[in-house]
Amino acid sequence: MPRIGYRAHDFGSFDSASALGERIESIRPSCIQLALNKVIPSARPWMEWDEEYISGIASDLRSHGVTVAIIGCYINPIHPDKEEREKEIRRFEKSLSLASAFGCPYVGTETGTASPAGDYSIETSGPRNLAIFKDSLSRMLEAAEKHDAYVAMEAVARNHTISSIDRLASILAGFPTKRLKTIFDPVNLLPFTGIPEADGVPLRKPSEEAEHRFVSDVLDIMGDRIVAIHCKDYFLDPQTGFKVGDIPALTGIFRWDAFAAELRKRNIDVPWLLENHNPKTVKETAETLERF
């Protein structure tokens, strides 16, 4: 049975950790991905975090039965401005240094884009930016080792540096350290034009065989390095054929029941964190997924 949690900022903004914990407890106690300043705008800026302050945040959440599954620190590790990139990496290192205070060893990030605004750039996938990403990742992993924490990397198709299964495999092979983990978001990593069938052509809804092949290929690569699943859904736009991947789980075409069965077969038992959920139906969504 999947363990269902939430991305905290999908519930909106809160004045305190206690208020956030109370909101999640009202659905049911669970785990969260916590991007602190995103969900609690009044929280101290990251430069001012310390053990006492973050431990207090975690304690307030635990009083409502809420624990942190992923520390959300989604930086741009290939930011084209070197000074900004340095600041981003320092912010990530700060989260790693306070992992024990959060009560969670995993700090999550995507892999960045060459666009300063964070959107698509055709330059992102080039060799220069891949080299910059590897350099940034090396620094982050050194900090993870120092603080007994883990970098949880999330690959995203098309937009980000690590945008394909093959490139993800190359990075994981090139950094065999136990400090590098992964967050598997099937919808984010799914090709922008859909899952291809055996003949290379995507259908409006992929066959069970094609979807299973996609999932299996990723799981073969990630294996026991997965520390969380991101759970949302998608469809292919009937006009463009491009993926629309920001809708609540169970409202699109991804076969979450088959996905759960494949994880069980491989003994992968990690939290599933709902993204882009509908607050009105989030409890029902969580309960349905748990039955898978």
Image (cartoon, rainbow, N blue to C red):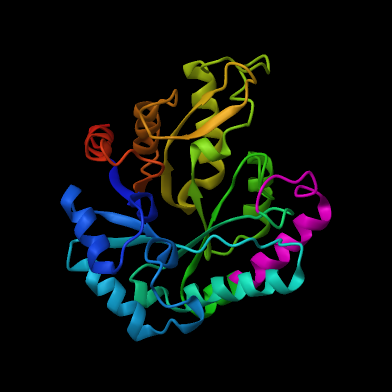
Q: Is residue 182 above or below residue 180?
A: above
Relative placement, left or right, of 159 versus 209 is: right
Relative placement, left or right, of 269 versus 284 is: right
Q: Quadrant of the C terminus?
A: top left
**Residue sitting at x 64%, y 74%:** 87
**Residue sitting at x 41%, y 41%:** 276
Relative placement, left or right, of 2 versus 132 is: left
Of residues 279 and 124, the one nearer the viewer is 279
Residue 80, horizontal then vertical, whole percent: 76, 62
Residue 42, horizontal then vertical, whole percent: 38, 72
Residue 1 visible in the snapshot: no
**Residue sitting at x 59%, y 47%:** 155
When asked about the image quadrant of residue 157, the answer is top right
Residue 138 visible in the snapshot: yes
Q: Quadrant of the N terminus?
A: top left
Does residue 139 belong to the magenta stretch?
yes
**Residue sitting at x 33%, y 51%:** 11
Relative placement, left or right, of 134 versus 25 is: right
Of residues 262 and 20, the one nearer the viewer is 20
- Total number of numbered labels? 0
Residue 69, horizontal then vertical, whole percent: 35, 59
Does residue 15 belong to the magenta stretch?
no
Q: Which residues are magenta?
A: 118-140
When asked about the image quadrant of residue 163, the answer is top right
Q: Is residue 32 above or below residue 288?
A: below
User: In terms of secondary structure, what is the magenta stretch mainly?
Assistant: helix
